[in-house]
Structure formats: structure tokens, C-alpha cells
Image (spheres, grey):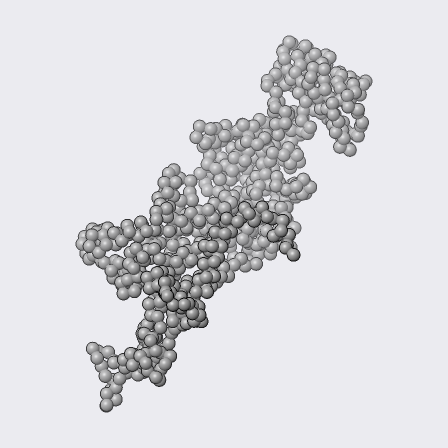
Amino acid sequence: MAKISLKNIKKSYGNVDVIKGVDIEIEDGEFCVFVGPSGCGKSTLLRMIAGLEDISAGDLVIGKTQVNDLPPSQRGVAMVFQSYAIFPHMTVRENVAFGLTIAGASKTEKDAKVAEAARILQMEHLLDRRPSQLSGGQRQRVAIGRAIVRKPQVFLFDEPLSNLDAALRMDMRMEIGKLHQQLGATMVYVTHDQVEAMTLADKIVVLKDGKVMQTGAPMDLYHNPANLFVAGFLGAPSMNFMNVEVVGVKGDVAEVSSPVLGKVRVSAKRGPFAVGEAAILGLRPQYITLESGQALMTGKVALTERLGAETVVDIGLGDGTSLIAALPQDTVYSVGSDIAVGFDGDKAHLFKAETLPEKGAH
Amino acid sequence: MASKFTRSNGTGWLMAGPAVTLIAAFVIFPFFFAIALSFTNQRLISPNPTEFTGLANYRQLLGLSMLTLDPVRDDAGAVVMKDGAAQYPALRSFTRKNPKYPQLDGMREWFAFDTPFGGDARTFILARDVVFMIAIMNTVLFVLVVAPVQAGLALGLALLINQRLRGINVFRAIYFMPVVVSIVVVSLLWKLIYDGSSGLLNSLLSSISFGLIPPVEWLGDPSTALGAIIAMSIWQAVGFHMVIWLSGLQTISPTLYEAAAIEGASKWQVFRFITWPGLRNTAVLILIVITMQAFGLFAQIDVMTNGGPLDSTQTIVFQAIDRGYGKQDISGASAISVILFVIVLTISLFQRWLTREKT
């Protein structure tokens, strides 16, 4: 068991900076998820913790040791790869016992530890098969088995579920969650899938372009995103953003309006805002209501997606922008009809004006 | 009725036509023609009609016999000695029109050894065609040395150049260079290198040993000639097999190496548990290719030694060519080709079986 601390970690390839000074503290036994769009450097960061990539600058401490220059095997880490990286010519048993074989363990020790790992992962019946006879989920189990058999201080997962189909991904996600509770080890998990991040993590680190955007518990990030990127990245469908003008400020509450939006009071914790300042209003689709009594704007229904438990409505506003609403029940709206749009100002987010993140960034 | 395959694919057959014709004319037909010729007494150019002679060519090539002889004794019963060695009856008296030994007629001594548990007796192995036997043994020796050494060296080079280092392509090019040079040119160059008086090898040996190593006539001495040809043959084609190994190495997923690094595997363990098992199919391919190429040893011999000195560098293919075109005995040469085909086929099948995937 160990805590991991990254202090001003940097990575560059020649003149290209990939990781631009990252500070993260991962507590002992914590499940930490690195999440971000492709190319944000999350896998590189994980590989630097593993020792598969050199650290250009900064300090990496696992437990109490500075491990910058230690080879992977001496860092006390185990890693599960996206492509599983199980050895094709060995049986499952030999794969799981690989680390022990390398270390020269006795056969009895190997058998006992492999049996224990197989029991934890419920794969006793697979031990004598070869990887080619296994399904994707079973291969992933073998890879995890190989990781847990050495009882490492730290587990590293590099997008372990992205090669699995949707149903299996959910099963394995739950299993990894259970495994974390069972083993109590520190785990670092890289994914681009925000659902995995939200469900598994004790702590999420949102990365973009080699920089940490925000660190915190999943619900903190969801309810109090520090910036537009985090706000847009977490949550599905992603948050709506509107350009507004601040017309009044009173403590943590601001009054805003825009050509399509009448004056409305919204919470404004990311202040201070000044009257007349341009700002960006963020609205989660889930907190938008389409009841005529609470109308703040009007629009036309452009598209509806009925998912049974949820209805997603794409609303075209007067100024040509669009707004997504997610309603918690199955409702029918006819495309092209006029509709009243309302929201709860306390659950809206007001951001300082900056460039809007691109839609569909994740 | 024509099958669908032949009837509805007129255009296809037309397009395949030129290739099929050429393969038929230059590969398939000669193959079966050689088999047919090997059962006749056909000569390259001869006014006499061809006759079917059955297995005569094979008997002539492969005929072997064993003869155990007691030494010549004088009247007192003591072994007659000549130049410090026991004297044995002249073999010629058995192999030249001896009515008691018609099966030995025309045979010559290949080699002899003291009969085990036979007192003073000596066993003579007689061959109908001693030169061909020597050619087979030389070829087999060549293959036995070249296959493992060349494959091993090529693997070593492939492992060395399969690294991301600055300028590694220069080394790849250097190791591959001998492969693109014609074997005839390479042979001529090495003939100069091996030269007995002014050759590079002798000069080098002499200078690094301060003149202690006397010059050796590498290609003129029966004890060094085959070794010299083996060494230069390994050098010439090692780059080719290096490239095949390299392609095999690059099919092994890099994450397997990363996984091994995290588990703490040493360099040897990485090779033993990941690299070598991942190269199984490549190894089969390389061993079969080297074996077949080595059995085909000809150009080096033709350019450098012509089979000499004292038949010490005779090989199967050199014999086939020498007989077919030099001695105009095309049917005998065909029989040699068929024998070579059977040997190579057997060895390839055996190698495949040895290196089969165990399930």
C-alpha cells in the first residue's frame, strides 16, 4: 500500500511538451481516475508512473521513495494494459504466475498464489486454457490476475475496458470496483470514458493538453466544475453553454440576460462578475424544464430522442443556437412545435467569458 | 460435363494463362521430365535412341557394399606388415571381374575401418560412385554447419539491429549488403581473400600474430577448403536471414515487452519467455530456407574450387551439373536431382514435424 505523489511532472519529446507540469496527490488505497480526451497525455502520465516512459522533469514519489530513475520492476507497481498484453504461447496459469516465475518462486508458492488470484477473479476453470481460447473479458481477467498475484502496492490500469463490448464493459467495471474494495490497494486508472470515471473513482483528475484541469471527487467535479472544459467534459449529454451579459450582481447571485433569454437570477460562485460583463451560462440538460409555467425562453423542437427512461430534446433557439434538454420521463414532442424552456437558476453555472470548448470534445 | 470452375472462368484462365504456361514450361514440366529421364540412359547429345533402364542410374549412384578382409599372413601365420601397417589383400582382386563377387564388380573403396571385435580384420566400405558419396557427405556437413551457425548469427544480428538507436539503419544496410551482391562476385572476391600467398586473410593473420601464423593455401588444402567455403557462405547470406528474423521480431507486440519489464524480467528471461516463443514460426521458415539453400550449394564451388582439391569440396548440385553438362550424362544428372529433391523434402517435413505447434 502506498500513496503516490506527482510534483511538477513534465514530459517532452524534443521540443514538444506533452505533460506540462502536473501535480497530483493520490492517497493510500485511493481509486484515482485520469480522464480526458484523446491526446491529453493521460496514458503518458500513467506510463511515467509505471516507469515505461522517462520523466523529463519533476518528482515522482511512490510510498516514501523517489522513483524517477527506478526501473518499473522496482517501483512496486502492476499494470493492466488496454491490449491485455498476455503472453499468447503460455496457458492462463503460466501467464498469471509469470511474475513469480521471473522471481524464481517455488512451484507450491506459485500454485497457491495463482489459485487465490483465480478465486478472486472467478476464473478457476480457465487456468489450463490458452489465450487464443479465451474471450475478451476472460483475457482481461487474466491480465488482472497477473497483476494481483504479486500483491503490488499500486495497480495501474491503462484503458482496460475499451476493447470490450458495452455489456461486458459494465460487468468488468463493477468487478474492478469490487476488486478495489477487496484489495484496498492504490489504483490509478486511465480512461476516456466519463462513465467509468464517475462510477469508479474516489478522485478524478481531468486532463487536457498535458495539464490538470481539475482534481476532486466525482460529484464535486460534476456539481462544481472549475472551468468550461470540465463542465463540458463530465455529464451526458454534455452541458449547454450560452453567451449572456451580466446585468446585475448581488453577492453570489448574478442577474443575466441575452437576446433569447429574459432577465434571470443565477448562482455565480465563480465571480466576481461586474455589471455589463459578458459571461457564459452553463445549463445541464437534466435541469432544464419544458413546462410553460416556468418559461424563460422559447424555442422550436428540432429533434427528439426517446430512450424510455429519458427523453433528449434538441431545441433550436431564436438566435440560431441550440439547447439540449434531458427530461426524466418518456414524453412526446412533435418536431417543429414551439416550446417553452425553463431552468432552475440555482443549478445553473456562470463562467467568466472565454472561448467555448468545442462541442463533442470527448 | 465441365465443372463450374473451368466453364465460367474463361476470362480468369485467359489472364492466368501466361503465368500458368511459363510455370508449366519451366517448373512443372522439367520437374517431371527429370524424374522420367532418371530412369533412362539418355545422354545430352547422342545418336543412340533412349532406352528405359529402370533403376540403373540410382544403383550406379547409390550402390554401397561392405567387405571384411583378414590381413595377409605369411606362412608362419604372422601378419605381413608394410610401412608399419598390416597389409590386406588388394581390393582390386575382388572388384575386378572376380566371379565369386559379381556384386562388387566395378566398385571402389570409399573408406575403411578396423572391424569392431574382429581382431586384425578390416572392414572396407565400397561405393559404386565414390565421388558422389563424397559429394553427399560434403553437402550434409555443409548443411549441418551452415544451418545452425547462420541462423544463430542472423538472429544475433537481428536482435542487435532491432533497437531504436541513432544510425541503426547504417548497420542494417551494412549487414544486408553481401546479399545484394551476386554470389559469383562474392566468390571471386573471397577467392582473392583466401589466396595462399597474397590473400587478405593470410596477411591479416600474419600481421596480428607478428608473422607466427604461416600463410595457408585455404582453398588448395583439402583440410581447409570446405571450411573456407562454409565460412564465406555463412557471411554472404547471413544478412538475408537477419532481415527475416527482424520481421519476425517486429511482429511481437511491444506491450508484451512492457508487461515483462513491469514484472521485472531480465534480458535473458525476456528472450526466453517472450522473444523466442514469438519467433517459432520464423524459426521454422528460416531453418527450412537455409537447409534448402545449403543443399543447393553450387556457385561458390564452381567459381572457387571446382570440387577440388582431391574432391574435398564436391557437392550434390556440383555433381549434377558436372555430370549433366560436363560429362553429358543427363540421365545420371537427373537421378542426382531426384535424389536431392527426396533428401530436401524429407528434411523439410522432418523439421516441420519437429517444430510443430504442440497443442
In the picture, the quarter occupied by the C terminus of chain B is bottom right
**Relative to B88, is A54 on the left or the right?**
right
Residue A349, quarter of the rendered image: top right
Please provide percent x and percent y for residue A287.
73, 24
Q: Is residue B175 visible?
A: no
**A241 or B186: which is nearer to us?**
B186
- At 56% from the left edge and 40% from the top edge, which residue is drawn? A156
Locate residue B212, reporting x and y percent: 19, 56
Would residue A167 be seen by someone viewing this image from the given angle?
Answer: yes
The residue lying at 72 percent from left, 15 percent from top is A318
Which image quadrant for residue A188? Answer: top right
Q: Residue furthest left?
A: B211
| Residue A217 rendering spot, x and y as whole percentages | 63, 31
Give the residue displayed 28% in from the left and 62% down from the top: B308
Picture quarter with the N terminus of chain B: bottom right
**In the displayed structure, would residue B321 be above or below residue A344?**
below
Q: Is residue B30 left or right of residue A141?
A: left
Outermost front residue: B47
Residue at 57% over, 26% down: A213
Residue B181 position within the rendered picture, expressed as x and y whole percent measured from the top left = 34, 47
